[in-house]
Amino acid sequence: MPQIIFQPGNRIIEAEEGETLLKAARRGGVHINASCGGAGVCGKCKVTVLSGTVEGGKGKHLSEDEWDSGKRQACTALVRGEITVELPRSGDLKKGSLGTEVPVHQKAGQHSFCVDELKKEGVFLPPVEKLFLELPRATAKDNMADAARVVLGLHNQYNVWGVTISLPVLRKLRQALREDDFRVTVTVALPVNESGKKYLINIQPGNWLHRNFGMAFDIGTTTVYGQLVDLNSGEVLAEGGEYNGQLSYGEDVISRMMHAEKDNGLDLLQQEVASTINDIVAGLLKKADIAGDEITSITVAGNTAMTHLFLGLEPDNIRRAPYVPVTTFLPPIRAIDLGLSLPRHTVAMVYPSISSYVGGDIVAGVMGSGMYRTEKLTLYIDIGTNAEIVIGSKEWLVCAACSAGPAFEGGGITHGMRAAAGAIEDFDLDPLTLEPMLLTIANQPAIGICGSGLLIAIASLFEHGLIDHRGKFGRDLPTDRVRSGRSGYEYVLAWREDTGGDEDIVLNEVDIENFIRAKGAIFAGVKTLIEEVGLQVSDIEQVILAGGFGSYIDLDAAMTVGLLPEVDPDKIIYVGNGSLMGARMSEMSNHIRHDVVEVVHRMTSFELSEVASFKDQYVASLFLPHTDMSLFPNHHLRIRRNPDE
Amino acid sequence: MPQIIFQPGNRIIEAEEGETLLKAARRGGVHINASCGGAGVCGKCKVTVLSGTVEGGKGKHLSEDEWDSGKRQACTALVRGEITVELPRSGDLKKGSLGTEVPVHQKAGQHSFCVDELKKEGVFLPPVEKLFLELPRATAKDNMADAARVVLGLHNQYNVWGVTISLPVLRKLRQALREDDFRVTVTVALPVNESGKKYLINIQPGNWLHRNFGMAFDIGTTTVYGQLVDLNSGEVLAEGGEYNGQLSYGEDVISRMMHAEKDNGLDLLQQEVASTINDIVAGLLKKADIAGDEITSITVAGNTAMTHLFLGLEPDNIRRAPYVPVTTFLPPIRAIDLGLSLPRHTVAMVYPSISSYVGGDIVAGVMGSGMYRTEKLTLYIDIGTNAEIVIGSKEWLVCAACSAGPAFEGGGITHGMRAAAGAIEDFDLDPLTLEPMLLTIANQPAIGICGSGLLIAIASLFEHGLIDHRGKFGRDLPTDRVRSGRSGYEYVLAWREDTGGDEDIVLNEVDIENFIRAKGAIFAGVKTLIEEVGLQVSDIEQVILAGGFGSYIDLDAAMTVGLLPEVDPDKIIYVGNGSLMGARMSEMSNHIRHDVVEVVHRMTSFELSEVASFKDQYVASLFLPHTDMSLFPNHHLRIRRNPDE
């Protein structure tokens, strides 16, 4: 990885080949003014390349003289090998003077489970297994029924007893046995419990042990993701995602559930998501060049509402007190019974839920992240419109969902938006000039701000003293970016001319209030939950972040605003799509499928609205970071007021 | 029951109100000449009513004087109260002189199993059970999932654990629970083994315990019979039968199996029989005034080929050495998956077979007749084109099938026919005049002879010395009814003018030879089988006759010709449609369903063609009754030669 040396200050950071100078600087904690988000529009991010070369970096704000003297726009200059860069004086001086006291903004390390580990532990045994049988030919002395011959062969060769042969297999059994002289590969669906029934769900003439494939799916409210897995190696052969086809019936879970109550609504929503899955299935098969009938099983995880809609179960009582789902556990189901374009023998296994608001996606995440077997007291948190919280370890688990509102997905925020091209996703503030450093998704001119940008922007404004504990702006700040607007005071993130739209993009006090309510609900949920089991927030030893938002979260910012409890950033990991990860894990290990059932039984679900202390906790959390500062003993380390103050 | 006194001889017999004098006489062992079969055509059966009254009895052969003097045609005169009848002199004299030495021809007593017995033994528990649950309403403190509430209720109220709720039930669970305030009736399909899984297959709001219905079906090659059973009382509410729709693809099992190998043939045959069942189902529901969705289960029995065709399993190897069926055991199957017009939740249970030629119909008969738990050494025999033989008791069971050929169904017999209107089904011979007494089905002029008629006719000809041990006619008999014909000598059963056709109906030496081969194969099968287990035919303590033919069989005749071993007629019972009886029994008792599995495992199947001694046994059996007369020590008692001889 090429190094970049920033002057003055001699700050050395590791960059990735081909990334923009702006991104590299941001990651290394180096502030460069940038108002347009990295689109090359505002021209604020001029730097001078002293040695080495960058690719690009031109812009209309850059004169030929400047270009010749090595000036480049950091937002469009791509790193190509080792370089030394000089920053413009104003921003650098103050920044540099903070020296190493300024912690580099951190993201959580990624966790992914290791197939080899499953193998080492002896739990790499897919719930749907293939076995090869070499059976004696039928003779006059040995003319038992074909089915009996297979059953006996399973016992003799594999010590497997008590297999039920399904009707579709019986229907092709005779020919399959004789096509390759009584050498056949059978597919056996194993029960969750050893005492359960085994089902022989497919038979193929000859030896097909080397071809056994499965699929793992996460049904998100917005997006559905799938993976095609080689069940012999555990390798992911293809993956892909699509928008959930149900989107046309409502953006959020609640509107979907409302639609399901209309005439034929449930059927429609079921068909929509099945059709989305079918599209992805087709794409995965094509990518991996595998025939559909080689797929033996599919594991699906999703939140409780999505699971209900996928299965055609009425979600009516999920959204009505006392919030009763139809079921949390689901038996194995034939994939075709769910409208999936998979062969008749394919088994669909659906992750169990905990309650109406803690669904199979969370259970899958708890499994996939390994939380269910860690000894560390762990907080697992998936932040979205609803934040799901799980606290515990291999000994015990408690969980709850809290309604954070849509702020983290850009809802209720003046210029809020989903994480899409043009969304401000990262932010830094020059402590002296109070000018911003914006980074947008896809380097498009900014058109709004998404959840991760919102978090870091508010944290920065707070760290630099532009807003106070209640989220209110100081009134006499030395910048025209803070001004009185329609909804209280506001900070101008980007001037109209630097945006992709036709107005200034701002962050106002009402936005900040909404954000504080969202983070407050989550923190209050965590605190309530952990105190219900007699522990303190400070006892938490590990934090696992799940979900799209979790992957992009800035840890310091999250602690600055009091969204996450203070934990050593090394002990925070993110699992990305934990739901998909857990689904894949179950797809490869029947052992884990068995553990899932235990985990669900072990997990105690709290209805926060039923816990008396929750409301007080919530009110106490409506401050940055919290009314009780003892919960954030290292808060002062993150405060980076103008040193001149 | 009215008595009839026959004069001379003062023979008193019990008649049934409304039956013909001819039938009553025949049953009582009184010979009356009758050539036309009871159709009032030949006029040979004139008798004089001395006291009492009969209804009808007129005929063109009866003059007005004769009528006035009390003469009646026995074949059309119906018994109405007590009467005294004088027989014509010729036939009576000799007959009477045989006195009580002539045994009355006997039929086997009917066996039927008793529902009360099942109840007394505590095994009256249908495999698909209904349970009523009164569940607590969901509240904020108790908001478990609907499914969990039902599962817990089953445990609390009935100590039932481990129930899997199927997807269709989950889909209606929410509404069902709330429609009658969490009072629901659930339908639980029990496993064969206690350790197996229970499935919750239906849910109804309110209490529906009093409505639980099932169906039992026998799929015969020719006819399909069904019964609708109240699973609470065990009562048969309706029954009915139809010709098997597969008949248009071949009369016998072999031609059906051949058709199944043609393109689309198997599907067609599957649909045909499903459609026949559906017709019967519709009829039964209508008769009993029950809605289709109240049917919780259906049990089906049939021979191995019929079972394969019904399930859509390839029968190819059933008819080819080494005669391998696809399967003998079948898991419970959803009735709709078999194309049955029954609700989605209805479970179809199919009787297991033993081998390619001993099918579920026989297993069902062994269950329904109680053979599987008797202490007596029993011979169970179902005679048709293939005769299935089971020998054993509650300790052990052996079975075999032997190909008897179609003689018992009228095949290969010059005037042979199925048991239909106009078929000679009963026969007696005047020992002096050698004139016949014929009875036909439905009192139609004779058009042929069916299996039961054939048996008794050949036995009579043998008993009266018209044919010898090899089935050959005496050459100088004092009757023009025995004559040389196209196929050796023959006996004229009915002269052309007395028949419903346009030729004499005869029984010739080739017919008799075919019959002897058929009965010989069966007896040789019985003897081979019992000797294989180290016993003797004389050890047999009980005979159970099954099937249509078995119901009509004349026991003395069967022993005379050596079809059945000599057993006290009191120890011979017939079960009629044993297959249907067994199906009904399983439908009402899960215990018995469990026993079926054990019985099938206990039953040792012999392939007679593989047993070295079978061929010798067969050759030795090609005599009337057998080459080894010591097997029939009471044979002489049945011989009724003309006393003048």
Image (cartoon, coloured by chain):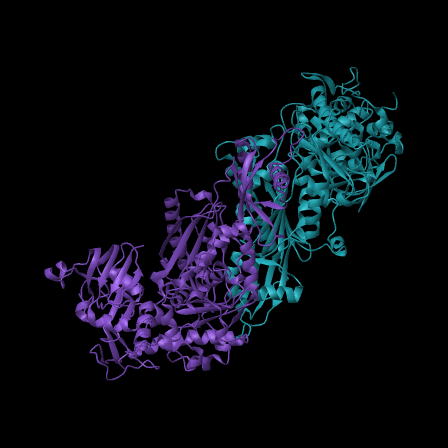
Chain colours: A purple, B cyan
Report the residue that reaches farthest toward the bottom. Answer: A475
- Where residue B7 sits in the image (x, y, percent)? 85, 36
- Where residue B237 sits in the image (x, y, percent)? 65, 53
Which quadrant does the C terminus of chain B fall into?
top right
- Where residue A107 sits in the image (x, y, percent)? 37, 64
Is there any visible trace of residue B252 in the rendered image? no
| Direction from residue B532 to residue B402 in the image, left or right | left
What is the tally of numbered marks visible in this picture? 0
Q: Is residue B281 above or below residue B457?
A: below
Compare residues A289 and B514 and report the one nearer the observer. A289
Query: Splitting the image into 4 quarters, where does residue B146 fall?
Result: bottom right
Compare residues A375 and B476 and report the one nearer the observer. A375
Residue at figure coordinates x 64%, y 54% from the top left: B190
- Where residue A531 sits in the image (x, y, percent)? 52, 76
Q: Is residue B450 above or below residue A330?
A: above
Residue at figure coordinates x 40%, y 66% from the top left: A253
Q: Is residue A3 above or below residue A634?
A: above
Compare residues B514 and B433 and report the one nearer the observer. B514
Is there any visible trace of residue A8 in the rendered image? yes
Query: Splitting the image into 4 quarters, where does residue B429 fall?
Result: top right
Compare residues A180 and B199 and report the one nearer the observer. A180
Q: Is residue B165 above or below residue A535?
A: above
| Direction from residue B597 to residue A98 in the image, left or right | left
Residue at figure coordinates x 22%, y 62% from the top left: A85
Query: Splitting the image into 4 quarters, where does residue A447 fall?
Result: bottom left
